[in-house]
Amino acid sequence: MNRNATLATLVVSQLVYVLFIVVWLFMAGMSVMMFDSPDAAGNATTWLVFILILLYPVGLLAALIAGWKRFSRRRYKAALIWNGIPLVWIVPLGGFLLYANLS
């Protein structure tokens, strides 16, 4: 990709990622409900999912910093790859919502 296309992609996608912070706040608040079951506190899978939900802002920050750093070094493809890190959280959520609405 050229510079202008990469710049536009970075700006638009990162604005969308920042808007997902509102969704993340709701998800983080509701994720505490996973521990309602008495056995959930000792379940490693529950803790793993809980920690993964809480790590979205860390992934977002890493993507923002690394993406713009690669962009400034004219490594446009690497910038776009680093910019895709938040999709690790967004795509499964979107898939779940799509599945819930279509079934």
Image: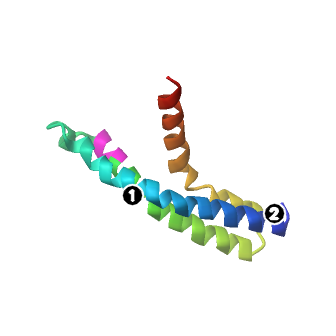
Would you say residue 62 is visible in this rendering? yes
Q: CA distance from mark 1 to mark 2?
A: 31 Å
Give yes or no for residue 47 being in the magenta stretch: yes
* Horizontal relation, residue 51 to residue 13: left or right: left
| Residue type, numbered disc 1 | Leu
- Give 35 or 79, whichever is nearer the viewer: 35
Circle 1 packing at 10 Å, graded few (<14), some (14-19), many (20+), is some
Secondary element at tag 1 = helix
Secondary element at tag 2 = helix
Write the residue at 66% across / 74% down: 69
| Residue type, numbered disc 2 | Ala
Residue with the most extreme bottom position? 72
Place residue 70 in its image quadrant: bottom right
Circle 1/circle 2 CB separation < 8 Å: no
Write the residue at 49% across / 42% down: 93
Give coordinates of residue 83: x percent, y percent. 64, 60
Q: Earlier along the polypeptide chain: callout 1 or callout 2?
A: 2
Vertical position of residue 82 compared to residue 100: above or below: below
Residue with the most extreme top position? 103
Q: How many marks?
A: 2
The quarter in which the N terminus is drawn is bottom right
Numbered label attached to residue 25: 1
Place residue 28 in its image quadrant: bottom left
Q: Which residues are magenta?
A: 45-49
Give the image's coloring scheme. Answer: rainbow
Write the residue at 22% across / 43% down: 35
Q: Which residue is mark 2?
A: 5
- Give 47 or 20, whichever is nearer the viewer: 20
